[in-house]
Amino acid sequence: EVQLVESGGGSVQPGGSLKLSCVASGFTFSSANMAWVRLGTEKGLEWILGISRSGEITHYDPSVRGRFTISRDNAKNTLYLQMTGLKTEDTAVYSCVARILENSYMGPGTQVNVSS
C-alpha cells in the first residue's frame, strides 16, 4: 500500500521559512517521480515543483521560483520542500505526489499558514 505522510507545516510570519518533509512507503521511492502540490482556498490545487527519479527538477509555479526548493533523499525515502520568503498567499495545505507507472498518489498534506 502506497503511503505518503507529510510533516513540517505550521504558522509563520511573512518572510519566514519552513521545511516540509514527505515520508514515503509501500513502493520503490527511488524509482518514482515526485512532486509537491498545494491546495489553497482561493486558487484551488496548484502544482509547485517536481523532481524526477534522476533528480531533474520541474518548476510548475513561477511564483515560488527562487523561494522554494525541492529535494529528495532516496536512502530515507523522503521528499523535502524548503520554503523561504513565505508570503500570505502561500497559505495552503501542502501535499506530496508520487507518480508510479500510470498512477498518481497524493498524501493528506500538512497545513501552512502565513500571516502577520
Image: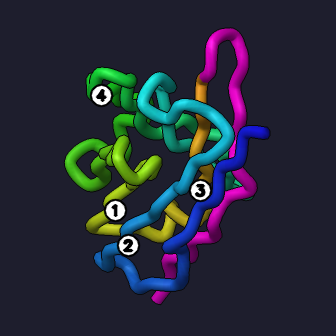
Which residue ends up furthest to the top in the rendered image?
102
Find out whether the residues at labels 2 and 1 contact each other: C-beta distance under 8 Å: yes
Give percent across and percent down for residue 22: 52, 55
Vertical order, 73 against 109 (above or below): above
Label 4 CA crowd tier, 10 Å (few <14, some 14–19, many 20+): some
- Tell me which segment is drawn in magenta: 100-116
Magenta highlight on residue 109 = yes
Gap between marks 2 and 1, in whole Å?
5 Å
Vertical order, 53 against 113 (above or below): above
Q: Earlier in the sequence, mark 1 or mark 3?
A: 1
The amino acid beneath tag 4 is Ile
Q: Name the residue tied to disc 3.
A: 94
Residue at 37% from the left image edge and 30% from the top image edge? 51
Question: Which quadrant of the structure image shows residue 84?
Answer: bottom left
Find out whether the residues at labels 2 and 3 contact each other: C-beta distance under 8 Å: no
Residue at 49% from the left image edge and 33% from the top image edge? 34
The amino acid beneath tag 2 is Leu
Q: Is residue 108 left or right of residue 89?
A: right
Q: Name the residue tied to disc 4.
A: 57
Find out whether the residues at labels 1 and 3 contact each other: C-beta distance under 8 Å: no
